[in-house]
Image: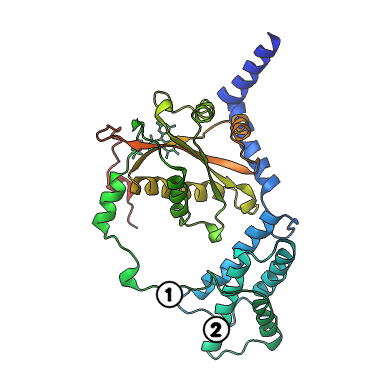
C-alpha cells in the first residue's frame, strides 16, 4: 500500500510538476556529460575514438571540397588524425573508417601534387607511410558530381512526393518484411549529420506483444496500437557528440527520422511518428524494455504499417508560407 503510494507520489513529482521538468533537464545534462566525448581528454573507448576520428578526418574532407582549398592546409590536424587512427587500427583493425581516412589523405596528397605544392618532406612522408600501410580503396575524400545527374526529381515532383506523405494511423493487416525496413534504414542513413558523425540508430520491433509493451509507455498511440506492424525506435548515441554538442543529438536524430519517414513513404508504406517526450525515468524504462543501451537517447518511435486501398488521415493543415518564410 505504502509502496504504491510512494510510486504514485514519485510519478506525480517527476511527471506533473515543474520539479519534474527541472529533474529531466538535469538528467539530460548528466547523461550528456557521462557519455559525450571530451576532445582534449579522449577516453580509450572505441565509440569515442571512432566519432572523434570521423569528426576530424571529415574536416580535411570538407576542406578539400571548398571552391579554392588552401594549399597544404591542416597539417597538424592530419598528423593528429594519423596518430589517433593508428591507435584505433592497432586496437580494432582497419575497418571502413580507417579506409575512408586513408582515401581522404590520399586525395589530400593528390590535390597538393596536382597544384605543384611542396609539402614539408617529413609531413609528406608521415602521410604517405600511413596511406601505404593499408587499403585506401574505399569511400572518402572527394566525389565528383555532374550537375545534370545531381538530382533525379524536379521541384514539382519533390513537392508532390513530400506533400503526399502524411501520418497514417489506419493500416491494413498486411505484414512488412524486416528486409524492407532494413532497406528503408539503409536509404535514410544518407541524412546529413554534424561533421558526418552519424550517431543515429534505428531499432526495429516486429513482435506484437513487444510492440504493445513498448507503446504502453507512449502517450499518442491509443486507438491504433494493434494495427502497427513494425515499430521503429529511433535513437542517437550520446557518445557521438562532444561536450559542446548536447543539442546536436536531437537535431541529427530528427533529420535521420525525417529521412526514414520519407523512405517509408517512397516504399508505398504508411507511418506515424510517435513522440518520446517522456520524463527521464520513463525513457530509462523504455530503454530497459527495448534493450537499448543507456548511452543512446530516444529521438522518436515510428509506427509502420501497410496501406489500405483507401484510408483517411488527419488533414494537419500547414501555416501560410508568409508566416514562415522571412526574407531579410
Ligand atoms: C516527433 C513527432 C512526434 C509525434 N508524435 C505523435 C504521437 O505521439 N501520436 C500521433 O498520433 N501523432 C504524432 N505525431 C504526428 C503529428 O501529429 C503529425 O506529424 C502532424 O500533425 C503533421 O501531420 P502529417 O504528419 O500528416 O503531415 C508526431 C510527429 C512528430 C514529428
Residue 108 image offset from top left, x and y in percent: 57, 79
Is the residue at mark 1 in contact range of ligand 1, meaning its CB lies under 8 Å from it? Answer: no
- Say few, some or many: other residues with alpha carbon within 10 Å of mark 1 (under 14 / 14 to 19 / 20 or more): few
- Give the image location of residue 246, x and y in percent: 60, 48
User: Residue sitting at 29 percent across and 54 percent down?
Assistant: 158
User: For the residue carrying disc 2, how many other residues have a C-alpha within 10 Å: few (<14), some (14-19), or many (20+)?
Assistant: few
Q: Which residue is mark 1?
A: 144
> Residue 102, how many percent across, how many down?
61, 73
Secondary structure at badge 2 equals helix
Q: Quadrant of residue 270?
A: top left
Q: Is residue 50 above or below residue 167?
A: below
Which residue carries the number 2 mark? Answer: 110
Above or below, 211 relative to 124:
above
Quadrant where the image shows the N terminus: top right
Q: Nearer the viewer, residue 85 or 63?
A: 85
| Quarter the C terminus occupies | bottom left
Helix, strand, or loop for circle 1? Answer: loop
Query: In the rendered structure, which disc, 1 or 2, sits on the residue that comes first in sequence?
Result: 2
Amino acid at each position: 500500500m505504502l509502496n504504491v503510494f510512494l510510486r504514485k507520489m514519485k510519478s506525480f513529482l517527476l511527471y506533473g510538476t515543474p520539479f519534474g521538468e527541472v529533474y529531466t533537464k538535469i538528467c539530460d545534462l548528466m547523461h550528456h556529460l557521462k557519455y559525450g566525448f571530451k576532445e582534449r581528454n579522449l577516453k580509450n573507448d572505441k565509440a569515442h575514438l571512432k566519432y572523434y576520428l570521423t569528426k576530424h578526418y571529415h574536416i580535411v574532407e570538407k576542406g578539400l571540397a571548398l571552391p579554392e582549398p588552401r594549399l597544404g592546409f591542416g597539417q597538424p590536424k592530419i598528423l593528429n588524425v594519423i596518430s589517433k587512427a593508428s591507435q584505433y587500427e592497432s586496437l580494432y583493425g582497419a575497418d571502413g573508417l580507417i579506409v575512408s581516412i586513408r582515401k581522404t589523405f590520399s586525395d589530400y596528397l593528390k590535390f597538393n601534387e596536382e597544384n605543384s605544392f611542396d609539402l614539408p618532406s617529413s609531413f609528406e612522408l608521415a602521410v604517405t607511410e600511413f596511406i601505404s600501410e593499408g587499403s585506401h580503396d574505399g569511400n572518402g575524400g572527394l566525389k565528383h558530381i555532374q550537375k545534370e545527374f545531381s538530382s533525379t526529381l524536379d521541384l514539382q515532383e519533390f513537392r508532390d512526393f513530400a506533400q503526399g506523405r502524411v501520418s497514417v494511423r489506419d493500416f491494413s493487416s498486411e505484414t512488412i518484411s524486416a528486409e524492407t525496413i532494413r532497406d528503408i534504414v539503409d536509404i535514410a542513413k544518407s541524412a546529413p549529420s554534424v561533421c558526418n558523425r552519424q550517431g543515429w540508430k534505428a531499432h526495429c520491433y516486429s513482435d506484437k506483444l513487444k510492440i504493445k509493451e513498448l507503446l504502453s509507455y507512449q502517450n499518442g498511440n491509443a486507438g491504433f496500437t494493434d494495427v502497427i506492424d513494425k515499430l521503429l525506435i529511433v535513437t542517437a548515441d550520446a557518445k557521438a557528440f562532444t561536450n559542446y554538442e548536447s543539442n546536436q543529438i536531437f537535431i541529427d536524430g530528427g533529420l535521420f527520422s525525417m529521412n526514414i519517414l520519407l523512405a517509408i513513404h517512397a516504399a508505398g508504406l504508411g507511418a506515424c511518428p510517435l513522440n518520446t517526450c517522456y520524463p527521464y525515468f520513463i525513457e530509462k524504462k523504455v530503454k530497459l524494455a527495448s534493450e537499448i543501451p543507456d548511452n543512446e537517447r530516444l529521438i522518436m518511435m515510428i509506427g509502420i504499417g501497410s496501406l489500405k486501398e483507401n484510408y483517411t488521415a488527419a488533414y494537419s493543415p500547414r501555416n501560410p508560407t508568409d508566416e514562415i518564410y522571412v526574407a531579410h
